[in-house]
Amino acid sequence: PKDPATISEVDGVVKFGEIKRGKREIYVYQEPAEEGVEPQLYEVPAGKHLRVHEGDRVRAGDRLTEGPVNPHDILLIKGPRAVQEYLLNEVQEVYRLQGVRISDKHIGVIVRQMLQKVRVTEPGDTDFLEGETVDRLTFRDENDRIQKRKSKPAAAEPVLLGITKASLTTQSFISAASFQETTRVLTDAAIRGAKDDLLGLKENIIIGHLIPAGSGIYRYAEIDIQPPAGYEAPPPRVEEPVPVPLAAAVLVGEEE
């Protein structure tokens, strides 16, 4: 967002410092105070409206100045759950102002996709590279495989993507190509020799397959349903021919 609010990264007490070169110094002293720990310093424009006063207690993630909160700051300070709740509440607020009621689950699906990626900070004994952005589920599966071998797992931090970027970085190149930048997505997939496992709804609709949901879910495909003991199937129905009046048959013949 433009001109975002300054938020506190720690719990503590607010103390105001000097104004230097048009910037006001705001110190947040952690509580309980720890020996050798310096207070957190924030410099904000002197003319910007403050939300705190001298001696106020703040918690990590609280705004010190007016303005919209940057979701990336919330993710960094408070974690994925907090940024999910923030985005959900902000979107719902827009609908509430218009008198529209919408279930949280619809917005939650979008927010979940915005947090589908993680950035590798420590590759450990995996095949990942430091700084590589990978799918969250792929990262989890690879770590599970490494831990079964008693090796060192990788470490990663969550990444917040915009809805456009999230749609273009999905695992399915068919789904990504149907959204935007079709030429680039297909060229990149061809160079990498990518394979689409058709795990999502969108790519299956494009191909013309059953969507993997409800009765079309993959794990139900090989289930053989056996009737209960003693069950006798009803005899098949035989459709009897419907008699056609002679006059109607004659009229049809004349039309032909």
Image (cartoon, rainbow, N blue to C red):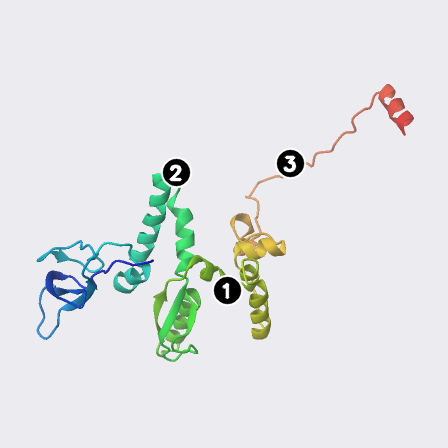
Percent x, y for residue 244? 82, 23
Residue for badge 2 = 100
Q: Earlier in the sequence, mark 1 or mark 3?
A: 1
Q: Nearest the camera: 45 or 145?
A: 45
Whole-number angstrom distance, CA of label 2 to CA of label 3:
50 Å
Determine whether 173 is above or below 254 in the image.
below
Q: Amino acid at mark 2?
A: Val
Percent x, y for residue 238? 73, 33
Q: Residues within 10 Å of mark 2 (few under 14, many from 20)?
A: few
Determine which of the numbered discs, if any, sits on residue 234 in the image: 3
Q: How many marks?
A: 3
Placement of the N terminus among the 4 image quadrants: bottom left
Residue occupying the point 18% across, 68% down: 21
Residue for badge 1 = 171
Residue occupying the point 59% across, 66% down: 183
Residue occupying the point 39% across, 38% down: 100
Quarter location, residue 94: top left
Q: Nearest the camera: 39 or 249?
A: 39
Image depth: mark 1 or mark 2 in front? 2
Q: Earlier in the sequence, mark 1 or mark 2?
A: 2
Q: Residues within 10 Å of mark 1 (few under 14, many from 20)?
A: some
Placement of the C terminus among the 4 image quadrants: top right
